[in-house]
């Protein structure tokens, strides 16, 4: 598990912090114009320069503990890394502190996760200003969700904003140390009778953020480091630290289990495949398994014989993100004290072209006896997951099964990088997952999985083919392919192709892996309800 570099707490007062974030609502349209700033800060900026617009930041430097404005000396300098924050210096005292005003937009408008992203950006601004102690004043009013849910989501985002993947970047001998925040206080706008609830929410958020960062640390590793064996070793290490049982199936063991679909994808690479099984028993008196999280872990996807274009092929190291999500989520189950039995499965392969690689036109047999006609070796993720899902179904028979996969470019076209696609025939499961996504800021959008789509992946010469109809409903075709391998239970396929990584900073997070799926899965498990027989399925007629 990654170690948090800063201490985060709930505090009723901002205290003697070097950096203070002061949230400000903007004025509703049509109201008489006046400053949105507190009286002591008015005059620090040109008229109407700071309006409290969403995400707007402006900062001034004041002597520590000063309550009144003593005069301005505007330098015009900009806060490092922030295009909208102008630093106004007031005196040159070494103990001066930065007060950063953050615009929240109009009250009761916008969404809470836009606020959280703004807070994370403001945190980075104060960090860049080399504030080692920071107080963040929470919004003075409703934010579109309960305050404890807001604190949970905010604290996880701040932990993730404090993460950077820079282990391979050498530092000059005489370069100053990297800026870092040592202590961070979240300060409610008013005295809260539910302070204990906020402490609990903070504790959950820290676990969520740490688990997501652990997943990101594996996501970001290059493929020459993060081989199937390396990722399996990461799972083994976290298992020892997290009260988990870890089993890693070798190539020979998978051959014995007749997992010929997964093995076919791995056949072109010198790197041997691995199947990681992480078991968490939070309810040891129960024999069965409540939930299974299955992740696609293609540590590098060249496309195989159906090779990808060279442009952005380097990003295919992120094709293991589903497996990272499963491992990351399991790493936190014990710390959250989940009273559930949960298994995490990471199917790890490398998809490469070679003389031994599987080819378009091949027919392979999965461990459940289904035959697969391979029409495109770059549609390998569903082939890998077919064995992973079928094996998990047979060995564990979980009540609910979720899979996470960077499966289709079609999902990126449909939803971009702001939402993951969720496909399931179980309405109750989708509702629960979407509710979790809204709470943690990992939004889902449901795409159809009607039986009619199953016809589009039927093969003339095998049980199923690994492509649908060209140019049509590609994400649904991927889920329709997986359906026969998930068994007769509530199952959801979550396509994270557009959300698993980002080439630029977003929501206060550095470029690279986003850890998507970890917080979603953990929140879902925290609110887990065993499925009921007869739940309405998508497409079923209402009586």
Image (spheres, helix red, strand yellow):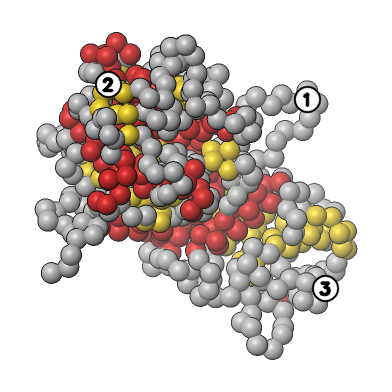
In the rendered image of this protein, does residue 375 appear above or below residue 29?
above
First reached walking from the N terminus: tag 1 or tag 2: 1
**In front of the other: 384 or 379:** 379
* 51 with respect to 9 (left or right): right
Q: Position of residue 528 (x, y in %)?
A: 25, 50
Q: Which residue is mark 2?
A: 259
Q: Position of residue 253 (x, y in %)?
A: 26, 13
Mark linked to residue 326? none
Q: For mark 1, does the 10 Å Cα neighbourhood hold few (<14), some (14 to 19), or many (20 or more) residues?
A: few
Q: Position of residue 128 (x, y in %)?
A: 71, 46
Q: Tell me the SS state at disc 2.
A: loop
* 167 with respect to 360 (left or right): right
In the rendered image of this protein, does residue 291 appear above or below residue 433?
above
**In front of the other: 330 or 336:** 330
The answer to whether the residues at label 3 and label 2 have Cβ atoms under 8 Å apart is no
Q: Which residue is mark 3?
A: 46
Give the total of numbered labels.
Answer: 3
In the rendered image of this protein, does residue 152 appear above or below residue 161?
below
Mark linked to residue 172? 1
Q: CA distance from mark 1 to mark 3?
A: 40 Å
Instruction: Quarter of the image for the C terminus: give it.
Output: bottom left
Q: Residue at x 40, y 15 (%)?
A: 267
Q: For mark 2, does the 10 Å Cα neighbourhood hold few (<14), some (14 to 19), or many (20 or more) residues?
A: many
Q: Tell me the SS state at disc 1.
A: loop
**Residue 449 seen anywhere in this rendered image of the structure:** yes
Q: CA distance from mark 1 to mark 2?
A: 49 Å
**Residue 233 seen anywhere in this rendered image of the structure:** no
First reached walking from the N terminus: tag 3 or tag 2: 3
Instruction: Quarter of the image for the N terminus: give it.
Output: top left
């Amino acid at each position: 598990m990654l170690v948090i570099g800063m201490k985060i707490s709930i505090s009723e007062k901002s205290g003697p912090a070097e950096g203070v974030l002061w949230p400000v609502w903007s004025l509703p349209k049509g109201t008489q114009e006046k400053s949105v700033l507190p009286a002591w800060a008015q005059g620090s900026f040109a008229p109407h320069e700071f309006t409290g617009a969403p995400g707007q930041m402006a900062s001034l430097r004041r002597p520590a503990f000063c309550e009144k404005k003593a005069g301005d000396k505007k330098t015009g300098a900009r806060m490092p890394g922030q295009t909208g924050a102008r630093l106004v210096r007031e005196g040159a005292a070494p103990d001066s502190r930065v007060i950063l005003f953050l615009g929240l937009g109009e009250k009761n408008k916008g969404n809470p996760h836009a606020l959280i992203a703004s807070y994370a950006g403001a945190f980075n601004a104060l960090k860049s200003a080399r504030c080692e102690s920071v107080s963040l004043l929470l919004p003075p009013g409703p934010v579109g969700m309960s305050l404890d849910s807001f604190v949970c989501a905010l604290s996880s985002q701040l932990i993730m904003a404090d993460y950077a993947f820079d282990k391979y970047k050498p530092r000059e001998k005489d370069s100053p140390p990297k800026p870092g925040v040592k202590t961070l206080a979240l300060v409610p706008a008013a005295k809260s009778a539910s302070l204990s609830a906020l402490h609990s929410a903070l504790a959950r958020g820290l676990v969520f953020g740490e688990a997501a960062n652990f997943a990101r640390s594996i996501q970001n590793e290059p493929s020459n480091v993060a081989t199937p064996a390396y990722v399996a070793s990461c799972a083994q290490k976290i298992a020892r630290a997290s009260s988990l049982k870890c089993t890693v199936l070798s190539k020979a063991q998978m051959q014995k289990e007749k997992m010929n679909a997964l093995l076919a994808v791995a056949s072109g690479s010198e790197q041997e495949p691995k199947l990681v099984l992480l078991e968490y028993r939070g309810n040891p008196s129960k024999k069965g398994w409540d939930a299974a999280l299955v992740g696609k872990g293609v540590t590098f996807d060249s496309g195989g014989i159906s090779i990808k274009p060279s442009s952005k092929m380097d990003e295919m190291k992120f094709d293991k993100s589903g497996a990272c999500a499963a491992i990351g989520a399991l790493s936190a189950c014990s710390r959250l004290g989940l009273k559930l039995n949960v298994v995490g499965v990471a199917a790890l392969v490398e998809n490469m072209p070679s003389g031994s690689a599987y080819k378009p036109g091949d027919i392979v047999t999965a461990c459940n006896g289904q035959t697969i006609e391979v029409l495109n070796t770059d549609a390998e993720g569903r082939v890998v997951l077919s064995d992973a899902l079928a094996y998990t179904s047979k060995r564990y028979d979980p009540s609910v099964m979720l899979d996470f996969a960077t499966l289709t470019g079609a999902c990126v076209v449909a939803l971009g990088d702001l939402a993951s696609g969720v496909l399931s025939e179980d309405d109750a499961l989708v509702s629960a997952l979407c509710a979790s996504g809204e709470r943690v800021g990992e939004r889902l959008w449901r795409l159809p999985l009607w039986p009619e789509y199953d016809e589009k992946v039927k093969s003339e010469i095998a049980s199923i083919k690994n492509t649908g109809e060209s140019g049509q409903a590609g994400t649904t075709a991927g889920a329709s392919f997986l359906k026969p391998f998930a068994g007769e239970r509530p199952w959801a396929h979550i396509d994270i192709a557009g959300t698993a990584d980002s080439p630029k900073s977003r929501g206060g997070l550095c470029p690279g892996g986003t850890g998507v799926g970890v917080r979603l899965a953990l929140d879902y498990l925290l609110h887990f309800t065993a499925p009921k027989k007869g739940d309405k399925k998508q497409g079923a007629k209402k009586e």
